């Protein structure tokens, strides 16, 4: 694995594959030929690239292009993705029904929402779990409903901490399918979150016959960027595919001001700026000039800079930490969550946060290392 | 004359999901976990069944596509439809929601070709889904791609 493989930004071969998956024939076909020359299909396909292959297959297919790899193994990867997703949607509908029967409003996030509203195809956006959002006043109720239904809560010792400082908790069913129950769309600046954020304009959507909701297309774009633009052992480059699919969809109008307003409110402006400029420069994303001007003029705070740098340099699901990385991660995770202003207030809040994390250590020995 | 109940079929929704890609229909029965693949000419018949549900109308047109082998065409078609019913991929319905199939020029030409490829009018069934899903679709499959496993040397 090369040095950039964990980056949220693609290396050269990953970028070629993204072009195959996302661009028009004149760019995609030469990119495919170049990708085949530069990548040994048996040896070099990382997990981030693998998850783009069904979309690449579909795009190549839409040009009427085929070759041995496309007609064989790429089509097979599409088939497998289609089946896994169909099974996941079927299970998701059952979970949504449980929550619905308990009177809890739901929305689907990430792959399920994007599959229904943007990709409109069950095979081209592989996913490994279901992400369901409930209003945060309903978080504990929703946890109880899933617990009573037999879903097993993962890392239970973190539940109370997450209910106060986190955005979600994971469950698994008997087949080990993961259900990520979210009560906040983002972990960032939790104190700034208001009850109607994201819920004010949700889109009705049906998942395997069950009515639920999706965030608006604009909010899904924000979510794809913020969730994706962090370093991860599994290269998180699919945020580019998700975001470009939203931006390029003929029937979607991105509300750029809403995007920037939420980005500012949740202190993720730097992530949004970096992502939009990258997509403009590498994938011809049409970002309005006024939006570019606003982004260029934005002055990020200390908290935003630390959180942004943490995402780019350390990010999620790190397997091995040095002590300094552990401390930095702990600090950056706190900063991501707080909505405090001013260095004194921020660091005063850090003490309270640390005290609660120490308390959770007595529950299980994973202080500073567990992903919340 | 009123049509008999068995003459109309519909996909067993919501348990059965399906998609046709590049001349191949893939189907999944979420209730049983079985996966199926239908290749041409079965795809042509499947798409018409999904569109109209008029199994008897399609049979009538298909049998006429090869007047020299009407019996064989009829038997192959019947077997194909019976397989779909046995596997619970389609169910018989009253004809309320179905539309009557009328053949157009393109379908007539396709049926004419299809009636001489009766050996391909089959349903491939894969019932070991959990094992199949464990197959790595890059390294564990043959050149046809997943779910066909790589042959041992």
Image (cartoon, grey):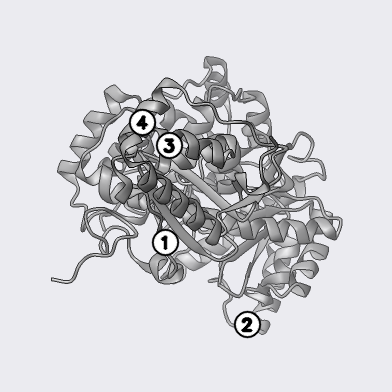
Tell me the mark number nearer the camera, choosing from 4 and 3: 3
Return the x and y of residue B34 as percentages of the image width and height.
Answer: 49, 63
Residue at mark 3: chain: B
Is disc 1 placed on a helix, strand or loop?
A: strand
Tell me the mark number nearer the camera, choosing from 1 and 4: 4
Which residue is the site of mark 2? A364
Return the x and y of residue A160 as percentages of the image width and height.
Answer: 75, 70
Which residue is the site of mark 4? B110
Tell me the quarter of the picture where residue A143 sits: bottom right
- Cα–Cα span, label 1 and label 2: 47 Å
Residue drawn at x 26%, y 49% is A72
Are circles 1 and 2 on residues that touch, CB within 8 Å?
no
Is disc 2 placed on a helix, strand or loop?
A: loop
Residue drawn at x 31%, y 47% is A74
Q: Quadrant of the N terminus of chain A?
A: bottom left
Tell me the mark number nearer the camera, choosing from 2 and 3: 3
Is disc 3 placed on a helix, strand or loop?
A: helix
């Amino acid at each position: 694995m090369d040095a950039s493989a964990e980056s949220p930004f693609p290396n050269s071969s990953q970028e070629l594959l993204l072009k195959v998956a996302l661009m028009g024939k004149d760019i995609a076909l030469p990119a495919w030929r170049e990708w085949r020359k530069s990548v040994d299909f048996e040896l070099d396909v990382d997990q981030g690239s693998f998850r783009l292959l069904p979309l690449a297959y579909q795009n190549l297919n839409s040009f009427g292009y085929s070759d041995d790899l496309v007609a064989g193994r790429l089509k097979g990867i599409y088939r497998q993705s289609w089946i896994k997703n169909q099974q996941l949607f079927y299970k998701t509908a059952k979970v949504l029904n449980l929550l619905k029967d308990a009177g809890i409003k739901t929305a689907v996030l990430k792959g399920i929402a994007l599959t229904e509203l943007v990709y409109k195809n069950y095979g081209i956006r592989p996913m490994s779990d279901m992400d369901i959002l409930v209003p945060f006043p309903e978080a504990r109720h929703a946890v109880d409903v899933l617990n009573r239904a037999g879903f097993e809560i993962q890392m239970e010792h973190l539940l109370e901490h997450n209910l106060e400082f986190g955005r979600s908790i994971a469950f698994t069913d008997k087949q080990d399918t993961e259900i990520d129950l979210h009560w906040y769309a983002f972990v960032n600046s939790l104190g700034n979150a208001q009850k109607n954020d994201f819920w004010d304009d949700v889109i009705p959507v049906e998942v395997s016959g069950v009515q639920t909701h999706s965030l608006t297309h604009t909010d899904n774009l924000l979510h794809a960027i913020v969730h994706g633009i962090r370093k991860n052992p599994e290269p998180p480059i699919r945020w580019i595919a998700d975001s470009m699919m939203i931006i390029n969809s003929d029937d979607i109008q991105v509300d750029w001001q809403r995007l920037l307003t939420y980005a500012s409110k949740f202190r993720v402006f730097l992530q949004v700026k970096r992502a939009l400029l990258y997509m403009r420069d590498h994938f011809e994303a049409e970002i309005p000039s006024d939006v570019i001007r606003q982004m260029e003029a934005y002055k990020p705070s200390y908290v935003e800079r630390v959180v942004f740098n943490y995402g780019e340099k350390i990010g999620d699901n790190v397997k091995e930490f040095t002590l300094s990385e552990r401390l930095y991660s702990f600090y950056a995770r706190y900063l991501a969550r707080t909505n405090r202003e001013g260095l004194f207030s921020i660091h005063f809040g850090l003490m309270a946060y640390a005290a609660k994390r120490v308390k959770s250590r007595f529950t299980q020995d994973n202080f500073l290392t567990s992903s919340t | 004359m009123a049509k008999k109940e068995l003459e109309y079929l519909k996909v067993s929704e919501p348990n059965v999901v399906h998609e046709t890609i590049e001349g191949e229909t893939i189907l999944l029965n979420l209730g049983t976990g079985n996966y199926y693949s239908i290749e041409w000419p079965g795809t042509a018949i499947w798409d018409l069944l999904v569109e109209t549900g008029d199994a008897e109308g399609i049979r009538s047109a298909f049998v006429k596509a090869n007047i020299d082998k009407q019996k064989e065409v009829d038997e192959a078609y019947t077997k194909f439809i019976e397989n779909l019913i046995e596997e619970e991929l389609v169910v018989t319905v009253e004809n309320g929601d179905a539309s009557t199939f009328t053949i157009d020029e393109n379908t007539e030409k396709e049926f004419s070709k299809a009636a001489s490829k009766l050996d391909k009018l089959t349903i491939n069934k894969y019932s070991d889904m959990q094992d199949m899903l464990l197959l790595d679709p890059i390294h564990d499959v043959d050149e046809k791609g997943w779910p066909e496993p790589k042959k041992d040397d």
